[in-house]
Image: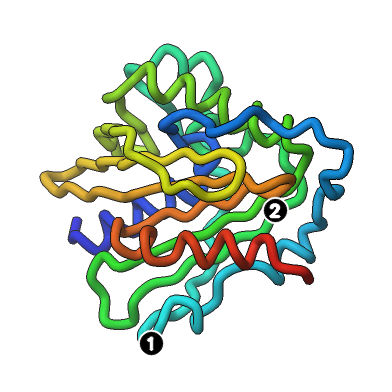
Amino acid sequence: MTVLSLSALAVLALEGCSIGSTSSTGPSSAASKDASVPAPLSSAQLAKRLLDEGDLGEGYDRTPQRPAAHDDVSVIGCPALEKLGADAATGAGLDFSRKARASFAYVDGGDSEVSEELYSDSAAKLSKGIGQIFDAMVSCPTYQVASGSTVIDMGTQVTDAPDLGDEQWSQLLTYSVGGQRSVVKQTAVRVGTVLVIVSGSTGLVDASLEKAVAKAQAAS
């Protein structure tokens, strides 16, 4: 497996489990209970707030979306995630119906890939959904994910999240398979009733996150 295909596998896994696999430095505040918080956005509204090629700079193309569910995925060596079931590894068990996503890759190859997902629901539901899997993830700094005949060794490392929005989570995910190793950063920010998740190469996530959060808050 090449570094590129390994990185693509990592992004595929992230696209499937972005909410489920986001770990955190700890939320900066409790979910808002302010009655003035706007209602959740529709999927169509969220789609208008996604990053686009112009936001990432020259050389990035949008890539086709991969299937959201992978029935043959299983978790090995993490009781907390195993208890939540295989859906925890693919994100299919998270009940956020309002969502939009986009993925991008650098046209010249390499591991410069990034994906963004936007979800909208009540602040409490977003916090609970991401927090449930976060608790499971931090209980297992190393574990394995099996997809068909492929077994991926996983590692997680909590990293500092930027001071954006109402709550923030961030981690580095290490994927090792077939003698190849790939590190992917994943950062999530909740702002009101919208959850922004950016995953991919570390530098690109860091460079794109603030703009992603700003666009997520912008008026449609």
Pick whichever of labels 2 and 1 is earlier in the sequence: 1
Residue 66 position in % (x across, y down):
52, 59
Report which residue position mark 2 lands on: 99
Can you say whether 109 is above or below 167 in the image?
below
Residue 128 position in % (x across, y down):
65, 26
Say the numbered circle drawn on residue 90: none
The amino acid pointed to by label 2 is Lys
Residue 89 position in % (x across, y down):
48, 33
Residue 59 position in % (x across, y down):
36, 85
Q: Residue at x 41, y 47 (%)?
A: 186
Which of the two residues, 137 or 24, is positioned nearer the viewer here? Answer: 24
The amino acid pointed to by label 1 is Glu
Q: Residues within 10 Å of mark 2 (few under 14, many from 20)?
A: some
Report which residue position mark 1 lands on: 58
Which of the two residues, 193 or 166, is positioned nearer the viewer here? Answer: 166
Q: Is residue 30 left or right of residue 137?
A: right
Q: Is residue 125 left or right of residue 37?
A: left
Can you say whether 17 is above or below 33 in the image?
below
